[in-house]
Amino acid sequence: MSNTQLSDLGVLDLSFNSLSGRIPRRTQLESFDVPSYTENPALCGLPLPNECPGDETRSINPRDENVVEQEHDDKFISRGFFVSIAVGFAFGVFGFYGSLALIDSWRYVFFGFFTLVGNWVLVTIEINFNKIKRRARRKCC
């Protein structure tokens, strides 16, 4: 395992080790402060202020890259996204209720099911209510 694959490090002090080269990008090594790398004059890259040869000037802090990615992800939610949701909802609702309105057998089954469930609930409530009444009469007299 190389040091670029390390994760969950709380403290890292590489100062006074005469290290050279670039600090690997997009690793946890970039998250440590500058004092962790002091007295390594040939070391370059973030978070150090000196740039490596061939680097372009940095205008964005690497810790802000997540913000840039989030802004890019937010472009997914646009006017077209909401229009497609509305069109899908309309087709779903009108497709369902249109089928019930146009096809008699589906309508009879749909409303018959809710009538059956409603009757079952009312009968169950009535039976339980009468049981409670009977228990109250036994205890009372």
Image: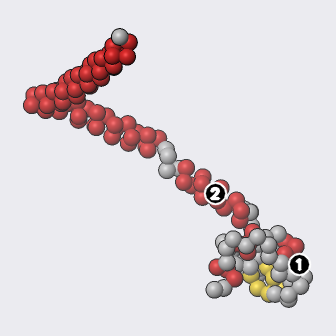
Q: Label 1 is placed on what type of residue?
A: Thr
Q: Nearer the viewer, residue 66 or 33?
A: 33
For the N terminus, give its image quadrant: bottom right
Query: Measured along the vertical axis of the image, is residue 88 above or below residue 115?
Result: below
Q: Position of residue 92 (x, y in %)?
A: 28, 37
110 sits left or right of 14 in the view: left
Would you identify the image quadrant in which residue 102 lies?
A: top left
Residue located beneath label 2 in the image:
68
Would you identify the image quadrant in which residue 29 lies?
A: bottom right
> Which residue is at 33% across, 13% downward?
137
- Its colouring scheme is secondary structure
Q: Residue lying farthest left?
A: 105
Q: Nearer the viewer, residue 128 or 15?
A: 128
Q: Count residues near mark 2 (Cα–Cα under 10 Å), then give few for <14, some for 14-19, many for 20+.
A: few
Q: Label 2 is placed on what type of residue?
A: Val
Q: Position of residue 11 (x, y in %)?
A: 79, 72
Query: Measured along the vertical axis of the image, is residue 22 above or below residue 33?
Result: below
Q: Position of residue 93 (x, y in %)?
A: 28, 33
Mark 1: secondary structure: loop
Would you identify the image quadrant in which residue 117 lies?
A: top left
Q: Count residues near mark 1 (Cα–Cα under 10 Å), then give few for <14, some for 14-19, many for 20+.
A: some
